[in-house]
Amino acid sequence: MRFLAQLDRSARALIVLVLAVALFFAVNIFSNVVFKTVQVDLTKDKLFTLSDGTLKVLVALDEPIDVRLFFTRALGERSPQSGRYFNRVRELLLQYAAASDGRLRVSFEAPEPFSATEDRAVAYGLEAVPVNEAGDQGFFGLAATNSTDDQAIVPFFNTEREAFLEYDLTKLIHRLANPQKKVVGLLSTLPIDGNTVSGQPQTERWPLVGRILDFFQVLPLPTDVRKIPDEIDVLLIVHPVGLDRFTRYAIDQFVISGGRALIFVDPVAEVEAAISQKRGFRPRGSNFNMVLAAWGLRLAPGQVAGDIDAARRVNVRDGTQMRVADYVAWLGLDEKNFDQSDVVTGDIGLLNIASAGILDTVPGSGAIVTPLITTGVRSMRIAADKIINGADVISLVKAFAPGEKKLMIAARASGLTRSAFRDGAPRNRDGSPASTTGQPHVSVAKSPVSVIVVADVDMLHQRFWLDINDSMGQRVLVPNANNADFVVNALDNLSGSDALIALRGRGESTRPFDLVLEIRRQAERRFRDKEQELREKLTSAQNRLNERLSSGRGQAGAVLRAEEKQALDDSQVEMFAIRNELRDVQHELRKDIERLEAWAKFLNIAAIPILLALATLCFTVVTRLRRRARMRAIKARAAA
């Protein structure tokens, strides 16, 4: 201390500066070593915090899984958005590896043209995209393998699925840890699997089943099944009509005991009438409300959902001629009708549904009901009889009285629910115990049930989502809607572990300046109005100039009168003036927007450091003033 006291003020300041720099580097090195895995997530949707479901999957890994992330540097240079997304994926994978206690091994590879790394990426089946005019290919995908050489890939990381990045990665790891194909039990009163129904001859399997078979094993079940087989992972029920109480009990016990189910019900199954080939056949409504009520849901009897905004255009006969009209009971639903945060509906673009029913909630069931698909607010409950007896499309439109409430068409039910059979297993008519599952009755779920209910059966038939064309003697199937994707998504989600089912979409790591975007839109509208006005003036001036030029040519070479020449000159001057004003307007638009963006960036980037600097300066000034005041007081006391 005596040594420091002997130094002048500048030397002491230099020593303090050197010590501060040394301390800065020491703290950084210490934190990088000790707190390498420690982080604070302040993002709105906790983007950088692993969910409990993911942690459960990682902790449960019994064998090592190798994950290789491929990313071409040139792709990041060409598309900064891809480079940012690569950093997001890489950071998330590093978190996975840290949480797996070494069982998830992550590596990063940068494939370059004509390299061995590029050959590996191609061999794994990753998708390539051009990165320059020379035709070089770039990769941004992932390949993972387990100890038995099972393989799973993400062909290309699309930024549009960023909200579901964690779900996609966790699902991939879960599948490698459990590589056996899941089993779907199919219980249907319609010939969806090509089976014989109601004495009708064997029919062709619906294309939907083919799509399901690409991902799952399918085990058809009889409609009088008494026990759902133990090997069933998820139960797919289509149009449960006429099921006896023993079959309903088997379904109830399967779900309440931990089984998962995807159920399609319908008040008007139009496809049933088309398949029956019986004249005058009336499509029957599903009668499954007794079981649905235990899960907090109820199919509104005799009611169909109508939506004037989502109505599909169909050809109808109006008197003696054909015309196109909105069919308010046949709907084309898009993103605004889906729960965008649920992995089942988050990436669905379009669903075509027909005379869909309405799901109402049942209070007191203990179930948590989450809507997945709804109509818009301009919807209406339509009497099912108006559809069953042959819909008058034009009359339905004229009589449509939209309400102000969305109608629920599909929902997810979960929670600790009770059995629909409160008195236990059903008995025979003589009161004797019936042979059902052979297991003790389960009255209350020990773990949350997991069920998805959809109030439309017709959407499963190919006429509503598939175009079938003949090309050179072969059938070409071209989907025109995402109906099959929705079914596969739901089965995939339900057949996963509880951890996977609990995962939902997160936010995106890109956070735009929302206020700036809104101000930008307002500025664009203001300037576009002025621009439109000037363009109309420019068109009018151009037309007048063309008319005068045509009139001048019509004089067969005669010399233009002085006033006509002056009029032509005036028109040209007016056009040049309007063009200059139009350029000024466009320039002002760009300058105004750039000014707004610059201010927003300044406030978000520089404002906080400036405020901190001002606060530090104020603190320093106040401290020095207080020190001087204290010194003056000490000198005053000493003088006294």
Image (cartoon, grey):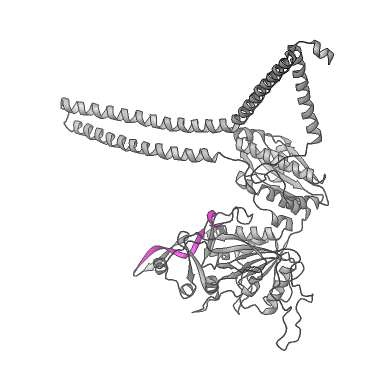
485 in relation to 39, above or below: below
Q: Is residue 591 left or right of residue 187?
A: left
Q: Residue at x 16, y 25 (%)?
A: 562
The x, y position of residue 291, in whole percent, is: 65, 73
211 in relation to 121, above or below: below
Whether residue 497 is visible to the viewer of this picture, yes or no, is: no
Q: Is residue 328 magenta?
A: yes
Q: Is residue 246 magenta?
A: no
State which region is magenta: 320-349
The x, y position of residue 269, in whole percent, is: 54, 71
In the rendered image, which quarter contains the N terminus?
A: top right
Q: Residue at x 27, y 34 (%)?
A: 541
The x, y position of residue 385, in whole percent, is: 48, 75
Q: Is residue 534 left or right of residue 159?
A: left
Q: Residue at x 53, y 72 (%)?
A: 268
Which is nearer the eye, 191 or 482?
482
Whether residue 604 is visible to the viewer of this picture, yes or no, is: yes
Which is nearer the eye, 199 or 83?
83
The x, y position of residue 407, in whole percent, is: 53, 63
